[in-house]
């Protein structure tokens, strides 16, 4: 065998499994295969001047490369079982939290010291939310910020590079079962190992689906979250963001009983484009460095949809809605809340005259032509509910960018060790459909590394 353990994907799941394997078994021969580039070579060509919109690079530097989809993220490591994945269903709630705290300690040691750990414990907002029929979920969140998150990744890479063999710009094409292990095939070469960890994230969702079919690993469809990104003056949410940084609030709509939730809150942050399999959607991030902060706060409002019979393709449904916005707006559409509720499109002049400056250049348009009525009604209802705890949320000038879609990979059938039906083939992180966040994906990496190390004893 070329290696003892091969890891496919260098996102948080892959990085933390490599890191923990090095801690537990320093003599193991470990290789990491990554479709994208090394951290310092990752550059999105959008500069706002020559290149204004996504040009669909062959390998998207935002989603791929060392650090995975999380590399330029806001670096919010949520320590909770309430959201971010269902890892606890496999490994138990206590162990899941312990592993997330362990990941946090490593992040702090590798450059995150000095960043703040926020918590919802004992906060007055819980009561205030519930009095207005809103539900604040429990969590602690380490906010590294995009800048410190990058430093942490740089430091972890410096530590790993002499202990692990990295193959960058090396997408794995296929995985085959061989006698005593696995063979992975890349464009120019093949490699063998005893144990294989697959951690390909959301950008590897289609690839993962194919591999599961080829290796006859059972899967089941997962949900898709559809909605908008809200941007408003930072003052509107400052009482919440100053104390909690990120508040995950859930609302159950009166009209349909659907759940709408806030997601990925970025105080003084920026709204950004995201490219998933060539479809342009919206996301957001913020910086720890005050010099890079904006005057706006953004967060997503999302509604979950899950299809099972006869239509199972939840992601395909989300993709079609995102394609529609791309068709109408050439990318992401932006609309003032006041225009939306008056049933008129936003125009460039209405956006220019607003009392808020958008942080993303998007096409002014009409989101009611894109989002299904039920989803849009739920979002509008929640904006009015949020207005009660953060007055100003329902102002006419509040900006809504669409669409935001959270794709989840189909859930791969794994056991309590996160091992597939094939012995020695583990599937972790967002690629498994079990995790949807930095801390859960990282914790799943540490977990399998310990399981693999224990089998070597
Ligand atoms: C803009 C943005 C902001 C975000 N902000 C946050 C946040 O603040 N907090 C939070 O908890 N989560 C956030 N997330 C989500 C978070 O980044 C993911 O949950 C996390 O990165 C998942 O880790 P992972 O290792 O499972 O997968 P990924 O990070 O997606 O990494 C998978 C890696 O596998 C590689 N790969 C895929 N296929 C192959 C193949 N065939 N061969 C080789 N390599 C392959 C990819 O190139 C990628 O680098 C954000 C995501 C985005 C896009």
Image (cartoon, rainbow, N blue to C red):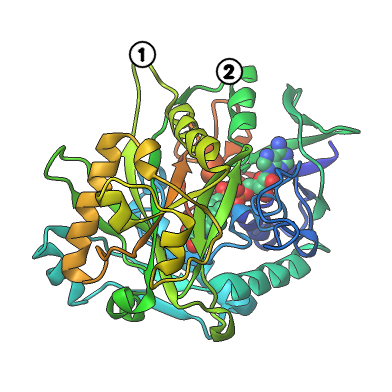
* Residue visible at 49% across and 71% down in the picture: 269
- 232 to the left or right of 137: right
Q: Residues within 10 Å of mark 2 (few under 14, many from 20)?
A: few
Which label was assigned to residue 359? Answer: none
Q: Earlier in the sequence, mark 1 or mark 2?
A: 2
**Mark 1 Cβ inside 8 Å of ligand 1:** no
Q: Is residue 233 visible?
A: yes
Residue furthest to the top in view is: 310
Q: Is residue 443 visible?
A: no
Residue 434 on image: x %, y %? 45, 41
Label 2 SS: loop
Q: Is 314 rendered above or below residue 433?
A: above
| Image quadrant where residue 211 sits | top right
Q: Which residue is mark 2?
A: 216
* Residue visible at 65% across and 41% down in the picture: 197
Q: Nearer the viewer, residue 194 or 113?
A: 113
- 253 to the left or right of 320: left
- Give the CA distance from mark 1 to mark 2: 22 Å
Q: Are marks 1 and 2 in contact (CB under 8 Å)?
A: no
- 243 to the left or right of 65: left
* Residue visible at 27% across and 35% down in the picture: 373
Residue 359 on image: x %, y %? 52, 66
Q: Is 39 rendered above or below residue 1?
A: below
**Mark 2 Cβ inside 8 Å of ligand 1:** no
Residue 306 on image: x %, y %? 34, 31
Q: Which residue is mark 1?
A: 310
Residue furthest to the front in view is: 349
């Amino acid at each position: 065998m070329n290696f003892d353990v091969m890891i496919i994907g260098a996102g948080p799941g892959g990085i933390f499994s490599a890191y923990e394997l090095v801690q537990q078994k320093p003599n193991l021969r470990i290789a990491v295969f990554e479709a994208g580039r090394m951290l310092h070579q990752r550059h999105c060509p959008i500069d706002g001047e020559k290149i204004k919109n996504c040009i669909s690079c062959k390998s998207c530097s935002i989603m791929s490369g060392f650090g995975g989809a999380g590399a330029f993220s806001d670096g919010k490591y949520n320590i909770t079982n309430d959201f971010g994945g269902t890892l606890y269903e496999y490994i138990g709630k206590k162990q899941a939290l312990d592993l997330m705290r362990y990941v946090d300690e490593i992040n702090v040691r590798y450059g995150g010291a000095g960043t703040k750990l926020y918590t919802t414990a004992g906060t007055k907002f819980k009561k205030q939310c519930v009095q207005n029929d809103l539900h604040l979920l429990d969590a602690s969140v380490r906010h590294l910020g995009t800048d410190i998150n990058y430093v942490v990744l740089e430091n972890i890479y410096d530590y790993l590079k002499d202990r692990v063999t990295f193959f960058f710009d090396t997408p794995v094409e296929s995985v085959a079962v061989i006698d005593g292990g696995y063979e992975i095939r890349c464009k120019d070469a093949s490699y063998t190992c005893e144990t294989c960890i697959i951690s390909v994230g959301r950008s590897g969702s289609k690839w993962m689906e194919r591999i599961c079919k080829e290796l006859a690993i059972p899967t089941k469809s997962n949900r898709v979250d559809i909605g908008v990104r809200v941007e408003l003056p930072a003052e509107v949410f400052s009482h919440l963001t100053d104390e909690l940084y990120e508040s995950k609030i859930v609302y159950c709509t009166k009209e349909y009983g659907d759940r709408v939730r806030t997601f990925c809150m970025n105080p003084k942050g920026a709204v950004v484009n995201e490219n998933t399999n060539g479809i342009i959607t919206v996301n957001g991030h913020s910086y720890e460095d005050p010099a890079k902060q904006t005057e706006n706060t953004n967060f997503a409002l999302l509604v979950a949809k899950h299809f099972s019979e006869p239509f199972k393709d939840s992601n395909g449904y989300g993709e079609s809605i995102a394609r529609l916005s791309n068709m109408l707006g050439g990318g992401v559409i932006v609309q003032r809340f006041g225009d939306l509720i008056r049933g008129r499109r936003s125009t460039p002049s209405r956006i220019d005259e607003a009392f808020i400056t958008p942080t993303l250049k998007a096409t002014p348009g009409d989101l009611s032509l894109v989002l299904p009525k039920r989803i849009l009604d739920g979002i509008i209802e929640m904006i009015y509910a949020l207005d009660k705890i953060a007055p100003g949320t329902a102002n006419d000038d509040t900006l809504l960018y669409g669409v935001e879609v959270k794709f989840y990979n189909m859930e791969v059938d794994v056991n309590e060790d996160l091992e597939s039906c094939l012995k020695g083939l583990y599937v972790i992180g967002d690629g498994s459909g079990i995790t949807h966040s930095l801390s859960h994906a990282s914790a799943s990496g540490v977990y399998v590394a310990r399981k693999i190390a224990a089998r070597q004893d």
